[in-house]
Amino acid sequence: MTQPVTLGGRPNMPPPGAPVEELLVARFRSHARRLFWPAVLLIATAGATAYLYDNLPAPFENWMLLAAAGIVVLLLVVLPFLFWLSRTCTITTRRVIVREGLGSRHRRELSHTRGYSISVRRGPLQRLWGAGTITLSNGVDEPMRLQNVPMVNLVHEVLADQVEVNQILAHRDAQISGQGF
């Protein structure tokens, strides 16, 4: 995804010295293929519970079956879904924000203006699903890893474009402020 282009082929940019509004570019979670096995387990648990209800041997009762099914669904279906749901990556025109955590929230940010290197790693299954792992490193802080990013090539292109545009704007504003305007 790129910035809108004018007739001269240059991206539309705000006037020098004007504040740049922060806009949302993309918001995503890791690829949902990680929820495949919990979904299969949910279907299997529902089927097994329906089949065994009122067909249990003498020492067991139906409430025991329902309690066991509830525990299995809670631990092996609901918790993985909540962990997947709790990690969000947001790309704006100024920064990359990664939020994660169920009870306490952990937030990391990386500014496009400082610049960073972007590396993409894709395993065989990730290639099959169009996903990949993006590592953003500015050389100072700990690298930021975005795991199982869906449409990884598009996200890589967006990040590269945002770094380039922000570097141009920062350089231009630094030159203008240095001239005394």
Image (cartoon, rainbow, N blue to C red):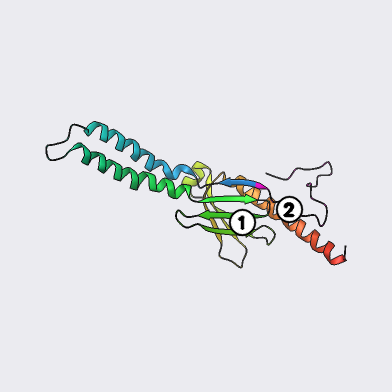
**Is residue 58 toward the left or the right of residue 143 in the image?**
left
**Badge 2 amino acid:** Val
Could you tell which of marks 2 and 1 lies nearer the N-terminus? Answer: 1
- Among the 4 quarters of the image, the one containing residue 96: bottom right
Q: Position of residue 157 (x, y in %)?
A: 65, 48
Q: Position of residue 127 (x, y in %)?
A: 51, 45
SS at mark 2? Answer: helix
Q: Is residue 61 above or below residue 173?
A: above
Magenta stretch contains residue 78: no
- Point 87% across, 65% down: residue: 179
Q: Is residue 6 left or right of residue 104?
A: right
Which residue appears at 56% of the width and 59% of the height? 108
**Which of the image's four quarters has the N terminus?**
top right
Give x and y (percent) for residue 84.
46, 48
> Overall secondary structure of the magenta stretch?
loop
Q: Which mark is residue 118?
A: 1
Residue 18 percent coordinates (x, y) = 80, 54
Q: Marks 2/1: CA distance?
A: 15 Å
The residue segment tinted magenta is 1-24
Q: In the rendering, which numbered label is found on residue 41?
A: none
Nearest to the eye among marks 2 and 1: give it: 2
**Residue appearing at x 13%, y 36% in the figure:** 57
- Say what amino acid the circle numbered 1 marks: Ile
* Number of on-image labels: 2
- Compared to residue 83, the image places residue 178 above or below, namely below
- Kindly identify which residue carries mark 2: 165
